[in-house]
Image (cartoon, rainbow, N blue to C red):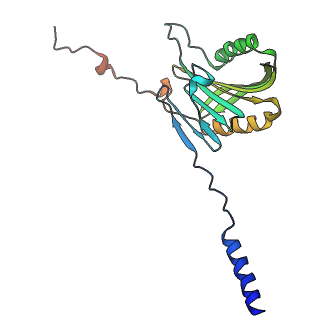
Amino acid sequence: MRIVVFMVLALLATSCDSTPKKPEPAAPLDFKSTVAPYTVKLSSPWTLTTADTLNTHADLAATYDDTLYLIVIPQKLPAIPGVDPPDALALKRASLAVLEERLKGFQIARQGPIKIDDEIGQSVFASGETEGQQIQYVATYATRGDWGFQVVGWGPKDKASLLTAEVDRVLSSWKFLASKPSELPIPSETEDAPDASTD
């Protein structure tokens, strides 16, 4: 009887040790753009994917379990003397015009300002039909100096809450890497003045 009890205890002890441990969550992926001045973190289960598969203009392209998708499209803003460069509102208007044209039943649920790092951008929550599927979109627009940024997340409409939470998580990690033009050092007059000793 003692042998049986000992064997049962031994089996229980080994079964406790063999319980599979939950894998540690992967560390966030720090994405630092080589195209534009920004960096962002992507936490598991987000993974990078080939940008061309989602949008030929995307700098960053990522997928969340092949259910949600996210792209970042940076663009150098036009510099026209005497004309202010486009702001986040102008980027939003141009992008929404394209979405309205391409998506069947395109509808905006809500939109408004959002803070990205230390800039005020514009965010839009919308939906539409593509290839027979109802898709939810969260699009965010921001400018910084002479750069404009579009951050677009999308997925099935029934995953709208998850999409919103995940895009918020990504945007909360966003950092601009360039100073605003007003923060750049202004050259002194001596630096700009021609050398007086030359004729």
- As displayed, is residue 170 above or below residue 16? above
- As displayed, is residue 153 above or below residue 23? above
- The image position of residue 166, as x and y in percent, is 70, 38
**Residue 7 lies in what quarter of the image?**
bottom right
Q: Which residue is rendered at x = 57% and y = 26% of the image?
A: 51
Q: Which residue is rendered at x = 48% and y = 23% of the image?
A: 181
**Residue 144 lies in what quarter of the image?**
top right
Q: Which residue is rendered at x = 62% and y = 56% of the image?
A: 24
- As displayed, is residue 134 above or below residue 67? above
- The image position of residue 25, as x and y in percent, is 63, 52
User: 54 and 35: which one is in front?
Assistant: 54
- The image position of residue 80, as x and y in percent, is 50, 7
In the image: residue 78, left or right of residue 63: left
Question: From where the camera sits, is residue 109 visible?
Answer: no
User: 46 and 42: which one is in front?
Assistant: 46
**Residue 54 lies in what quarter of the image?**
top right
User: 40 and 157: which one is in front?
Assistant: 157
In the image: residue 45, left or right of residue 183: right
Quadrant assignment for the C terminus: top left
Q: How many badges with numbers are in the image?
A: 0
